[in-house]
Image (tube, rainbow, N blue to C red):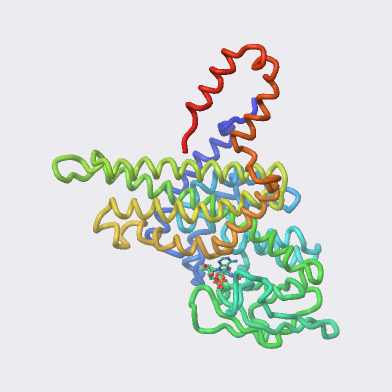
Amino acid sequence: MAWDFSTEPEFQAQLDWVAEFCANEVEPLDLVFPGAAWSLNPKARALADPLKQQVKDRGLWALFLDKDLGGPGFGQLKLALLNEILGRYRSAPVIFGTAAPDTGNMEMLAAYGTPEQKERWLTPLLNQQIFSAYSMTEPQGGSDPNLFKTHAVRDGDEWVISGEKWFTSAGARADIIFVMCTNGMFVVPRDTAGVEIQGYPPLHNHIRYNNVRVPADHLLGPEDGAKVLAQRRLGGGRIHHAMRTVAQVRLAFDMMCERALSRESHGKVIAEHQMVAEAIADSYAEITMLRLLVLWTAWTIDNSSTREARTQIAACKYTMAKVLRDVSYRALHIMGSLGTTNLTPLQAMYASAPTMAIADGVDEVHKVTVARNVLKGYEPHPGLWPTEYIPAKRDEARKKFASLIESDPDLAAWADAAVRATWRG
Ligand SMILES: Cc1cc2nc3c(=O)[nH]c(=O)nc-3n(C[C@H](O)[C@H](O)[C@H](O)COP(=O)(O)OP(=O)(O)OC[C@H]3O[C@@H](n4cnc5c(N)ncnc54)[C@H](O)[C@@H]3O)c2cc1C
């Protein structure tokens, strides 16, 4: 029977293990050593190593990569179910080898890299011996790639890259940066002469590429192929963000429900006030809709490709931002004054909602994509009336009953009266 919403028992056992592992091992690390898993301090970073080893021993490392790209090949649906757990914990994606921006960069390398490029960069990225960043957005424009100016010029055995990028997440700490040029995607080691990292923004770096020279074999994929590589990278990245957002909104929902049952006001627990009940009911429905949209999209990718699923991915992108904003706001509000502090995860969660609506492409652009693709399945109606204009349809339908109507005046009169009774306006 198709349309089966259940998880196979073997994978459910893995998910149960992950939930327990994250609660018992990952969360304590996050609470006592926040940021240790990606720290530049080797002693702090080493704290995550035994946890990563446990994940590898369970066969759950780097789940996002398909078998043909060198991963375990579990597919996007299983990854979505896993991310519904990981997304609750800050360092879980790093501990499971599924953290952005490395995942998208690895996907590009796996799909487009030569065997030498894969050996040089993909293997150490997979093992997290090195870290990467992705430099696409430029100060003069992010949503429209036609405004990008960063360019590479061939000079003998080298490419010379000139331009300016910003919002390159983790660029200052990356070992290699994937730089999108107007004429190709290039891998640039961060310590190459001419890579000039500006002082701010501190985490999403502004970088000048001043005549940066890289060997010819640092071009990834075909010359002039940067947009295709970028689409591949961003499509995967967006659905992974959506999967983790499901985890976030479920966490907010759990907090909302627990608090609603724990506080009293005006003679009853606040859960019994109808507006609180409405917040819970709306959140429940919105989270469920988002979750099903994300799982269906992941399933579609598994059964076709990221490209085939691009309309659904775009819908996930702006829906997750909206559900995150609405649910985290309601949860924060129900938490009262405590919700406005950073003593629970809610404040940070609510603050991240605008980022979700901007990073990886602004909502407006994704909405236009969805509308444009959906409209391909439609045509304008011929003539004045829309297809569903009832009088025109009825005239057409009467032809089917013409002989009956002609032969039975009583029935014809009854039909006319019945139709008149349906008229409004
Ligand atoms: C936390 C964070 C991390 C990021 N990490 C990276 C990274 O690692 N690498 C990287 O390259 N980039 C990164 N980005 C940049 C991100 O991809 C861009 O911010 C995004 O593409 C939007 O570009 P922009 O900021 O220049 O906004 P603009 O393109 O200037 O858009 C601003 C606003 O204009 C409106 N608008 C724009 N275009 C349209 C349109 N077609 N239709 C209707 N309205 C429109 C919208 O309201 C939009 O919000 C990151 C951004 C954030 C916030």
Depth check: 96 or 376 in front?
A: 376
Q: Quadrant of residue 391?
A: top right
Q: Nearer the viewer, residue 312 or 100?
A: 312
Q: Position of residue 14 (x, y in %)?
A: 55, 39
Query: Residue 304: x, y in percent?
Result: 72, 44
Point 66% across, 12% down: residue? 407
Residue placed at 66% from the left, 76% from the top? Answer: 147
Evaluate whether residue 261 shows in this view.
no
Q: x%, y% of residue 179?
A: 68, 74
Q: Is residue 424 above or below residue 212?
A: above
Q: Quadrant of the N terminus?
A: top right
Residue drawn at the location 50% of the way across and 50% of the way down = 86
Above or below: residue 374 compared with residue 8: below
Q: Quadrant of residue 396?
A: top right
- Residue at point 75% right, 80% down? 152
Q: Is residue 32 above or below residue 422?
A: below
Ligand 1 rendered quadrant: bottom right
Left or right: 418, with 229 as reference point:
left
Please, which residue is most extreme toward the left here?
267
**Numbered-mark total:** 0
Q: Position of residue 82 (x, y in %)?
A: 54, 45
